[in-house]
Image (cartoon, rainbow, N blue to C red):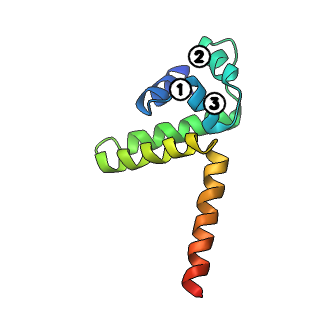
Amino acid sequence: MKVAIQDLKDVMNELNLSCSDFASLIGIDVRSITRWLDETSTPTLYAKKFIFALKWKLEKDQKDPIAQRIFQELVNAAVQTGGLSMFLTIMFDNYTQSQRTRRE
């Protein structure tokens, strides 16, 4: 999978993410992001897939400002909760709790 450093820059810019925010989002050290941007290192396959997915979502929602805003809010929430893994865990937990409450 070919992901250009410009793709990373574009995604970070469009989502208003600093290097630190992006590193937090995917759960890696901020120095890795810096090395990628300096082109002294290349992203891992996981990171490339993640960058590709974010770019795809941003391009898909280009003409839908509501979807763009919601996506931005979800990304910000993921950064604030300590990354995507923790954010998804919280979302799954909330969903599980709501389903349990509905069935009681």
Q: Earlier in the sequence, mark 3 or mark 1?
A: 1
**Residue that label 1 marks:** 8
Residue 25, disc: none
Q: Classify residue 73 as left or right of residue 31.
A: left
**Residue that label 3 marks:** 23
Can residue 100 be spotted in the picture?
A: yes
Can residue 2 be spotted in the picture?
A: no
What count of labels does the image hold? 3
Q: Earlier in the sequence, mark 2 or mark 1?
A: 1
Q: Nearer the viewer, residue 10 or 16?
A: 16
Residue at 50% from the left image edge and 26% from the top image edge = 7
Residue 37, disc: 2
Q: Residues within 10 Å of mark 2 (few under 14, many from 20)?
A: some
Instruction: Give the residue at the far bottom of this rendering.
Output: 104
Give coordinates of residue 73: x percent, y percent. 44, 46
**Dividing the image into 4 quarters, which one contains the N terminus?**
top right
Residue 39's place in the image compared with 90, above or below, is above
Dot 2 falls on a residue whose secondary structure is helix
- Please identify, in this view, whether the residue under mark 2 or under mark 3 is nearer the observer: 3
Q: Residues within 10 Å of mark 3 (few under 14, many from 20)?
A: many
Dot 1 falls on a residue whose secondary structure is helix
Give coordinates of residue 20: x percent, y percent. 60, 26
Quote the CA–CA distance across marks 3 and 1.
12 Å
Give coordinates of residue 28: x percent, y percent. 70, 31
Residue at 63% from the left image edge and 17% from the top image edge = 34
